Image (tube, rainbow, N blue to C red):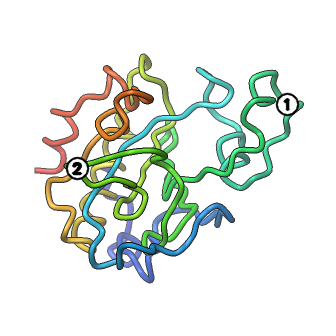
Amino acid sequence: MDDSLSQSEDKIVNGWYLAAEKCPSPHYDEREQCSPQAISLLVIHNISLPPGQFGGSYISDLFLGKLDKNAHPSFKDIYQLRVSAHCLIRRDGTVIQYVSFNNRAWHAGVSSYLGKEKCNDFSIGIELEGTDDTPYTTAQYNHLARLTTVIKSNYRQIGENIVGHCDIAPERKTDPGRVFDWQRYKQLLA
C-alpha cells in the first residue's frame, strides 16, 4: 500500500477525509433518519464519463451539477441529474471528496440492505473510476483499502457491512462489476 500520506492527512475531521481533494457538491442533504454515529454501510460503485472513458473532469462536473450536455452525446440524458457520492477514487488513486461523510450523498437511489430501505440515509458511497468490465488499478485498490480503514475507524457501525451497488439495488445496478476483486480488497483490509 502507498505510505506517502502523513498520519495527519490520513484521518477524517468533521466528516472530511484530509487526504482527499475537496470538491463540495450541492447534491446532498442532512441525514434525516440517521445520525453520523449510526452510519452502518459502505457502498462501492463505479462510474466513467463518457461511458468507458477515463480521465477528465466529467465525473466531477456531474456531481457538481455542471455537466455540459453538449460535451458528449451521452450527456444529454444525464446532465440534469442531481447525484453525488461521498468520494471518487480515480484510476491513479487520487481521492476526491464531494460530500461530508456526516451528510447524505445521493448515490444509492432506490435501495435496500438487510430489509432496511433508503440506503443513502445510513451509508457512505465510494465511486471507483471504472466500468463493470475494466480491471481496477492497484492504486485504486490500495487507496480504497486505506480510505475504508479510516472510514471504519470513524464510523464503527459499518463493521463488515461493505457491499457493491449491485447488492443493494440488484434489479437496477451491476456495479462495481464482475471484475471487482473482493478477495484482493478484503486482503488489503486485513
Query: Callout 1: few (<14), some (14-19), or many (20+) C-alpha neighbours within 10 Å?
Result: few
**What amino acid is at disc 2?**
Gly
x%, y% of residue 44?
36, 43
**Residue found 25% across the figure and 63% down from its top:** 40
User: Looking at the image, which is closer to me, 34 or 190?
Assistant: 34
In the drawing, what numbered circle is on residue 111? none
**Residue at image mark 1:** 71
Q: Which mark is residue 115?
A: 2
> Of the residues under marks 1 and 2, which one precedes in the sequence?
1
Numbered disc in front, either 1 or 2: 2
Name the kind of residue labelled 1 in the image.
Ala
Residue 85 x/y as whole percent: 52, 53
On the image, which quarter does residue 178 sit in? top left
Q: Which element type, helix, strand or loop, lies under badge 2?
A: loop
- Report the side of 62 relative to 129 (left or right): right
Residue 135 horizontal side relative to residue 23, left or right: left
Give residue 3's quadrant in the image: bottom left
The secondary structure type at the circle numbered 1 is loop
Instruction: Give the residue at the far bottom of this rendering.
Output: 14
How many numbered callouts? 2
Note whether 80 is above or below 171 in the view shown.
below
Name the foreground residue: 36 vs 145: 36
Q: Eyeballing the image, is 59 above or below 124?
A: above
Task: Please state if 32 lies on the left or on the right of 147 as rendered.
Answer: right
Q: Residue at x 34, y 30 (%)?
A: 170
Residue displayed at 22% across by 50% down: 115
Q: Residues within 10 Å of mark 2 (few under 14, many from 20)?
A: few
The spot of residue 69 in percent (x, y) is: 85, 35
